[in-house]
Image (tube, coloured by chain):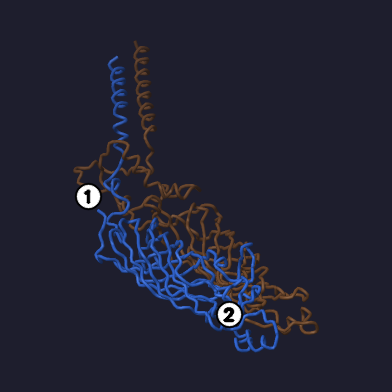
Amino acid sequence: MNKTLAALAFGAVFATLVPEASADRRVNGLSTDKAVRHRRLLVSKRFELSPLFESTINADFRHIVGGGAKLEYHFSDMFSFGFIGVGSTAINTGLVDKITPTLLSQSEKKALEGMGMMIREPSKEEFEQRLNSMPFHGAAYVSLTPWYGKLAAFSQAFVAFDFYFQGGISIATLESNCDKVNVCNDPSPGKPRNVGGMIMPPDLNPNNDDPVNNGTKIGLYIGGGIHVFVNDFIALDFSIRDYAFSDNPSGADVSGPNKGPDQAVDSQDSRLIHHLFFGAGVSIMFPTRVKRTP
Amino acid sequence: MKRLRMRAFHRSVVLFVVGLAFTAGSALAQPKKPAPAPKTPAPKKDDGEIDMSAPDPGEIDMSQPDPGNSPPGDLEKDMAAADKKNLAVKSGPIRKTPLSWEDIVVVVRKPFLKSHRTELYPYVGTTMNDNMIRHYTVGGELAYYLSDTLAVGVEGNYYIAGFREPFDLVARQARRLPTVNQYNWSAALNFHYVPVYGKFAILDKKLITWEIAFTAGIGAGQSEVIPRDTKFPGFTNFLIMPNVGANMRFFITKWLTINAGIRDYAFIDKFEPTNRAMGINDTAQAARDNADSAFINNVMFQIGISFWVPTSFEYTTFR
């Protein structure tokens, strides 16, 4: 009987101890630690100033190549806002270099037209001067940096990096320098003209129309890139940026009121074009001393 | 009397067994520990220091199954295992016990191994550097990894061509008919090298590992002249196409990755001669004989999903 009670008591005591015993499962001090301690806050609460280089990707008629700067404030590890401005020059693409030598000069074309020939193709001047350039472009944006990490290159170099995505408003100044006296001299493209008191029909020649592809444009901006930190306050910055705004880079007759060529160049020929740029820069973070998480 | 004692003894044994069963049942109800606790002597003081008196810390028991070597399954589960441990600990009272060498992982091993595995990589791609004609590709690559950083593979591409805006614009505006070729197919033998490996956190929540691979290869392909004037026949060219490229690979599961990268296929292509009329280069053979040659870089962006065989792997190093 005593043994029965003893066994019963032992079982009951053991059973009541079980939850406590199982709760005493083996843990250690690391279990309550953060996943990453003393993490360097490479961007949080810091200004980022980036001298940068930008070039268009796969431009149709003119490459836009230039330099500028990006100024950004990271008000947290993940969110920031900033501005970018780039001054650029324009370089003809291979397509333009192939077409131009095959065209007549303006004087040759005029001479042939003076002999009564109807020449529909543009002269070199008409073709080249209608192309526009982009002396300045920039954007104001907000930025999200959702990914950060570190990488090992050749098992030797260990660097921190982050990916960022940006969205905002783009601005660009476009410029075309068409000679309004000798080249782009149609006073009323696509409309009847008054010549010496006589109303003449439209000339249906888009080559002598004003290209209507200069001025300041406002549009959308999206971008994305990667920071590769070489130390606590300097990072390499590589990005792809899309400045999307209304443009007609070739100054050509693209679309009329009926969504087709109407043999006249006007504002309806401008359409939303994505100007895709590759950017490379060096980001300098201020203050240069980096903070760390606990 | 004896029988009673036997019954009493039997009853006590039953009660003891019931107690043990209850114990076991209660223990089973607790969250499972991912690894058996080492049999360390009771601590004399709980000061958080590493217990150097743990039994033979330098010796690793090879007979014990490696808890990290889970059966074929989800990479995400493996990577989240540490978090699960912490969650389980937080659900009950915590009592600190001495650390041992098992707790200290100096170098975290890769969550994905490629050595001696085969990658099947179907992908789609698009041209990045041609402003007259855009090619879309549907392709695939089969690569065998000799080690975790070196692989050899074969790829094949089928091309679908479409004209871009300048093709029509140049014809309409400048009265010039562009000379363009379309690509029909290509195949290559490639070698891959993976020099960059990293990991990143997404929104402070999820860890993703990734790597960058460089590729170089040699292959062949076919281009086809698109005649400016449809009265004249086009012709095809056989191309020798070396290629170089870089590719990013994001590890999703033990058998699935997402890849994205660029590839530059370089070759010498033959284009339709500019002087073509009745009696002049009007046959395909004559046009091919008098074709203009040019060195072409066809840069493609490619993105796809890789499937890995075998679907799992075993670590050859310790935790």
- Marks 2 and 1 belong to one chain: no
Quadrant in which residue B317 is drawn: bottom left
Dividing the picture into quarters, in which one does residue A173 lie? bottom left
Q: Colour of chain A?
A: blue
Q: Pointer 2: what residue? A: A127
The amino acid at mark 2 is Phe
Q: Can residue B63 be seen at all in this image of the molecule? A: no
Give the color of chain B as drawn: brown
Comparing A195 with A57, the one in front is A195
Tag 1, which chain? B
Of all chains, the one bearing label 2 is A
Query: Residue at horizontal 77%, vertical 80%?
Result: B285
Residue A69, image x and y in percent?
Answer: 36, 71
Within the image, what quadrant is residue B210 found in? bottom left
Decide if residue B221 is on the left or right side of residue A94. Answer: right
- Identified by mark 1, the residue type is Glu
Residue B49 numbered tag = 1
Give the left or right position of residue B122, taking residue A278 as reference: right
Residue B247: mark: none
